[in-house]
Image: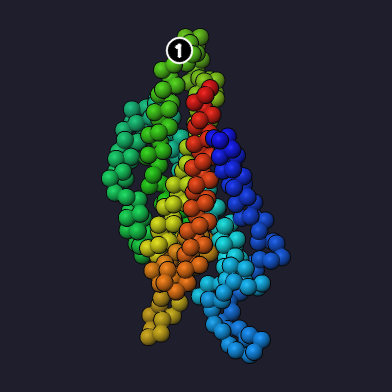
Amino acid sequence: MRKFTFLAGVTILALIILIAFIGPYTPFIDSELTEKKFEFLEDNTIIVPPYPPSKEYLLGSDSRGVDLLSRLVMGARETMIIIFSIVIIRMLLGVILGFGAAYSRLIKALLVIWNQLFSYIPPIFLIAMIIGIPFFLVSPNRPFWFIVILAILEVGRVGETVHKLVVSITQTNYYEAGIVVGNSPIGLSKKYLLPNLSPQLVTIIVNELGRVLFLIAQLGVIGIFINVVFEPGEFGGFNIVNGSESWPNLLDNIQRDIYSHQIVPFSGILVISLTVLSFYIVGNGIIRKLSKR
């Protein structure tokens, strides 16, 4: 049963990634995300969005008249790019700090401070405060800063996890034997640390992907977007509106849509939950396989 669950998780995850990068080129997807403010029925009746499910809109449309299925498919690529970019940066810095902490007291102290500094306040509140700073708010490179900030905030936690794994390996008999035969620190890393650490790192990466997706989904609920557009307001000034099509942005009006356009937030919740679940299943499957070795 566990093997079937693991294979199901891998299959679902592979399909989601495949859809993210191939889906936009399929003929039934509107890659332009065209908005239709109204439509005429056969009896010349005018209807306005959101449109119900039909041949043209398999899942219906959102309040702008954009095909919801196309929005899900087009948002998949952006969502995958965001979460993979965050995790790659976080893992690179975490591995460097985790390894360094095993050999340097200074780096270990830095890692402890970093971890403690950001561990007492939920990331969503820190991100809300930081990303709202005018520099980040109006920066043309906001998506870059958004990704970097989300990655850095939890580098300490990842680094501490990697450090504990490194320490546990360095305390094994075969590692100590490598020291006795005269291996350099680099040689020890190549022969003993990396081969034993790599499977655990894969598990951490998979779990971090799910964690990051869940976090940006929370940010979508409170209206914090990876990219924003400034539009003129009715009575002067500017309105800050979402400039992204990633999945969490289907939740930005959840309090309104939950009563009138349920399909919009429900579709976002469904694809996000399914993806997080597949990451969780794959991560746990890898852990179980490692524990049998």
Q: In the rendered image, which quarter contains the N terminus?
A: top right
At label 1, counting other C-alpha atoms closer than 10 Å, the crowd grade (few under 14, some 14-19, many 20 or more) is few
Which residue is pictured at 40% across the width and 36% down the height?
A: 159
Any part of residue 92 in sight: no
Left or right: 16 in relation to 92: right
The residue furthest front is 1
Give the percent coordinates (x, y) of residue 181: 51, 9
Give the percent coordinates (x, y) of residue 113: 30, 38
The residue furthest bottom is 44
Any part of residue 147 in sight: yes
Count of labels shown?
Answer: 1
Between 207 and 181, the one nearer to me in the picture: 207
Between 6 and 276, the one nearer to me in the picture: 6
Give the percent coordinates (x, y) of residue 73: 60, 61
Q: Which residue is mark 1?
A: 173
Between 153 and 5, the one nearer to me in the picture: 5
- Rendered image coloring scheme: rainbow
State the image quarter where residue 11 is shown: top right
